[in-house]
Amino acid sequence: MTEFATYPSLRGKAVLVTGGASGIGALTVEAFAAQGARVAFLDRDADASAAVSDATGAAHALCDLRDIPAMQDAIAGLAESCGPFTALVNNAARDDRHNWAEVTPDYWDERMHTNLRHMFFAIQAVAPGMIAAGGGSIINLGSNSWWEAGGGFPAYTTAKAAVHGLTRTMARDLGGHRIRVNTVVPGWIMTERQKELWATPEALEAHQKRQCLPDLIDPVYVARMVLFLASDDAAMCTANNYMVEAGSI
């Protein structure tokens, strides 16, 4: 059994995770709860959210992150019970495959709303509380799919490439308040969704040949990187990319 680090600075910290009911998000909620953080999450899946809350004790609110006013109201409500959030994990996204020749303007806009737009408005919602608290940590989830020129989902890879621009500019705008903003860049992470939809033996074999390390990547390792960046151990880390992709770029 792997023995992971404990971060005393996370105990009692108010943490918000978007898309916390499944996959990387659920493992991240679990990891913060194990550190003694006051963790809350947003998701639209009622049954999965209830299961994660029951297992971890985390607070949650149901909302569609594409509805920005509803999301910001949900964040405000959770902050009333958890306290002002001093860590935000912008995790929520969907890597649905699509053919470039069939993409419509409406579909393109919906993909931006699903994978990018809510990140900025979540930052906008939590930043005043972080400023009042004297600092904070914002962790945006990117993807190495565009770094390695992955095909089959151009709207997704465009949104994920834009996350890096968001991270860099917000790190500059918020840095004077001691708010750190970083991007965690996962490779192909073996969530249940990936296993069910795309992780065929042939696809896995081809991908493993691209990695420097031979092992498939468990989502827990993304959560561990997020914990580090939220902790005081990462106090001088900002405006950067932190790769969890087994050397596959």
Image (cartoon, grey):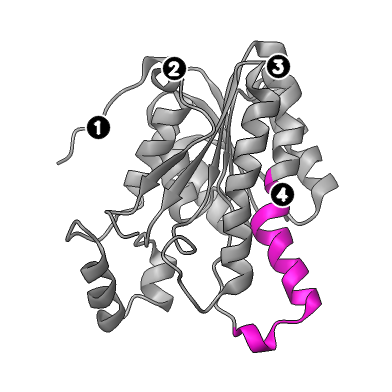
Look at the picture and state if 167 lies above or below 6: below
Q: Residues within 10 Å of mark 2 (few under 14, many from 20)?
A: some
Q: Quadrant of the N terminus?
A: top left
Q: Which residue is mark 2?
A: 232
Residue at left offset 60%, top offset 49%: 163
- In the image, the segment drawn in magenta is 99-119
Residue 33 picture location, percent across and down: 44, 31
Q: Which residue is mark 4?
A: 118
The kind of secondary structure element at disc 2 is helix
Residue 81 picture location, percent across and down: 68, 25
Q: Which badge, 2 or 4, comes first in the chain's sequence? A: 4
Q: Pick whichever, 166 or 131, lies toward us.
A: 166
Q: Residues within 10 Å of mark 3 (few under 14, many from 20)?
A: some
Majority secondary structure in the magenta region:
helix
Name the front one of labels 1 and 4: 4
Q: Quadrant of the C terminus?
A: bottom left
